Image (spheres, rainbow, N blue to C red):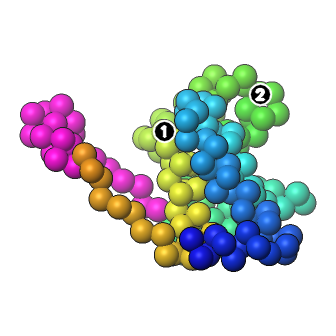
Amino acid sequence: MTILSDKLRTDERNVVREMKAPEYYFRAWPLSPEERFPVLCMALDAIFGDSNNATQAVVDGVNETLSGMASEQQLRAILGLQASVIHGGAPDVYDSRKYAKYYKKFGCDPIRDLELAVRACLRKKIFQGKLREHPDPDQDIIETAKAKGRLPLRLTRCRY
């Protein structure tokens, strides 16, 4: 909370802009995935965006923040999907041909990958790596569901 308090008290333009990112992230929580997608893109733009070099600035910012753990190819594909939705190529993320291409190429949901990237960037950039993930309170339910074959034995997590 001290980190947030300090950031909220500053009038430095870049910090004020950065503080929009957690706001967008929390605003996206209750939304459906297709509604969440553009709001999460706005969160990355708030942290790393540069109107003169938008895509490259976000890719470079995410890679620098996550020490190269993010796939540049996947980030570019997500940002291309964002562009197709925002600039009218598709009415919604699921209607974009780029969504299906992403899923086929990378074997995962680009919306979920975006959520994981935003979360990881918020932790490192905004909260300076001090925000800790708490254990899942439903872990015993998950383990029971795995044992009964209702969930995969290995739930993959993103590298972020």
What residue did someone put label 1 on?
109
In the foreground, 62 or 6: 6
How far apart are labels 2 and 1 at the CA level? 19 Å
Residue sitting at x 68%, y 57%: 21
23 relative to 148, above or below: below
- Residue 37's tag is none
Q: Which residues are magenta?
A: 139-160
Res. 19 image quadrant:
bottom right
Check disc 2 and give the amino acid type: Gly
In the foreground, 10 or 129: 10
133 relative to 143, above or below: below
128 relative to 119, above or below: below
Name the quarter where the N terminus is drawn.
bottom right
Secondary structure under tag 2 reads loop
Residue sitting at x 68%, y 42%: 39
Secondary structure under tag 1 reads loop
- Whether residue 26 is visible, yes or no, is yes
Residue 159 falls within the magenta-colored stretch: yes
Judge from the rendering whether residue 155 lies leftward or rightward of residue 15; answer left or right: left
- Whether residue 68 is visible, yes or no, is no
Tally of numbered tags: 2
Judge from the rendering whether residue 16 lies leftward or rightward of residue 112; answer left or right: right
Residue sitting at x 51%, y 75%: 129
What residue did someone put label 2 on?
89
Judge from the rendering whether residue 140 lies leftward or rightward of residue 22; answer left or right: left
